Image: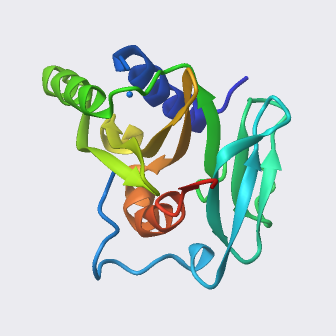
Amino acid sequence: MIPYRLLAMSSTLLFAAALAGPAAVAAGTAGPAVPADFSGPTHRVQLPSPDGKSFPYTIAIPAGWQVLFSGNVEGVFVGPASALEPEKDVRMIYVRVSPALLLDPDAVVANIKQSAAASSSWSAPLVEVREVGGVRGVLVRKDSGSGAEARSTLVLKMPLGQTSVDFMAGAPRAEFEHLLPGYQRVILSVLPVR
């Protein structure tokens, strides 16, 4: 059974895949403090993809973080070594291949904005084209649910051949706001391999 955290993030991916035809936040100025698990010196790693090769992107992760695999879902998790259940730990960044083609990020952004405006069950307070290392992707924040069920997810979607790769993190809304600066620090460090 796939944990709710991943189901919620997967709905974001399916949503993006459905909207993608051909397929993020400016690296902020001073803002909220980065949570302790996300702070400190970083090192850049290239992540393994499900086909045994590597994704054509690297990501800067804090010291003490590692790449973890799951027996339950495809993709990899990046996060603190102390995370015993990566699928359930809100500190984890989940990286997976998405079937969404990302040839025209501007069109994907426009489609997401149009769909969000028409929906009463979710919103996308942040949807923008994000260029990293000369490669254009899409950065999305999706908010859904209310009360105790309120959740937020941050996704950086980058092109990967005829598919795309998603770097994403999500949590219950109350935790998400606290974790967001850390999520941004790691997810927005993504760079293409040169």
Could one spot residue 152 in this view of the protein?
no
Quadrant of the frame with the C terminus: bottom right
Q: Determine whether 11 is above or below 53 in the image.
A: above
Percent of width and height locating residue 165: 57, 36
User: In this rendering, would 57 be left or right of 109?
Assistant: right
Give the color scheme: rainbow, by chain, secondary structure or one colour.
Answer: rainbow
Total of numbered circles in the picture? 0
Question: Residue extending furthest front?
Answer: 194
Quadrant of residue 96 within the rendered picture: top right
Quadrant of residue 5 within the rendered picture: top right
Could one spot residue 186 in this view of the protein?
yes
Residue in view at x 33 percent, y 35 percent:
144
User: In this rendering, would 120 be left or right of 165?
Assistant: left
Quadrant of the frame with the N terminus: top right
Percent of width and height locating residue 104: 33, 28
- The residue closer to the viewer here, 145 or 112, is 112
Q: Determine whether 110 is above or below 20 in the image.
A: below
Quadrant of residue 137 within the rendered picture: top left
- The residue closer to the viewer here, 51 or 186, is 51
Percent of width and height locating residue 25: 31, 57
Q: Determine whether 111 is above or below 42 in the image.
A: above
Percent of width and height locating residue 163: 56, 23
- The residue closer to the viewer here, 144 or 60, is 60
Residue in view at x 63 percent, y 42 percent:
95
Residue in view at x 40 percent, y 81 percent:
33
User: In this rendering, would 141 be left or right of 1?
Assistant: left
User: In this rendering, would 24 be left or right of 11?
Assistant: left
